[in-house]
Image: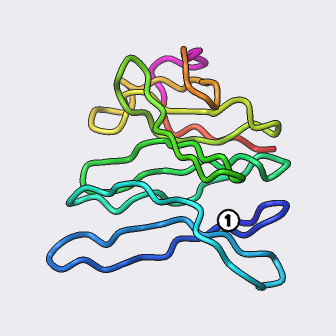
Amino acid sequence: MWGPRYISYDRERLRRSDAPVFRIWLKSPSGAGGRRLTNVRVPSLLSGPVPIAFSSTGSRLLAEFEGQDTSEAWTVRVISGRARKLSVRGRPVMAGGISRDGRTVLIDEGALEGPQSSGRVATIPFAGGRSQVLVAHGSQAGWNG
């Protein structure tokens, strides 16, 4: 994922008889350097976070934690590397996009394991909180710009 200050990418560590572990790394667009951004615990059968989108300043990153029967939206503060799972009423949500200023995340609620018509497209603050439903009975949201 190309951001204004960094390119984010996954590095994987293989595990015997299990899914690989993903960690998000950052590198300058020139290709110089490289630093690990995330270091979250990755349970068995799960792989970990993959980058989805940066805010316009590059200080906030939206990621998706992936694995078997799992697709969860996570937010990452680029300066500190603090990663946080987003949820609505205690249930994980899927990432759709991040607003330009990085304050708001576009999400899909409830569409992962059910029919898409049971999902809801909503927004939620980057830090978590109450969601605001934009489209009931929808899913697969995307945000352009």
Q: Which residue lies furthest to the left in this view?
A: 17
Q: How crowded is mark 1: few (under 14 residues within 10 Å), some or many (20 or more)?
A: some
- 58 relative to 24, above or below: above
Which quadrant of the structure image shows residue 31? bottom right
For the record, the magenta segment spans: 131-138
**Quarter occupied by the C terminus:** top right
Residue extending furthest toward the front: 80
Q: Does the magenta stretch include residue 135?
A: yes
Q: Position of residue 4 (x, y in %)?
A: 84, 60
Quick one: SS at disc 1?
loop
- Residue at 49% of width from left, 76% of height from top? 11
| Chief SS of the magenta region | strand
Instruction: Give the residue type at disc 1.
Output: Met
Q: Quadrant of residue 87?
A: top left
| Location of residue 32 in the rendering, given as x and y in whole percent from the top left corner | 78, 85
Question: Where does the N terminus fall, quadrant-wise?
Answer: bottom right
Residue at 67% over, 69% down: 26
Pinpoint residue 48: horizontal percent, then vertical percent.
Answer: 39, 59
Taking the image as shown, residue 92 lies to the left or right of residue 78, namely left
Side of 128 relative to 137 (left or right): right
Residue drawn at x 31%, y 72% as measured from the top left: 20
For label 1, the residue is 1
Left or right of 119: which side holds 27?
Answer: right
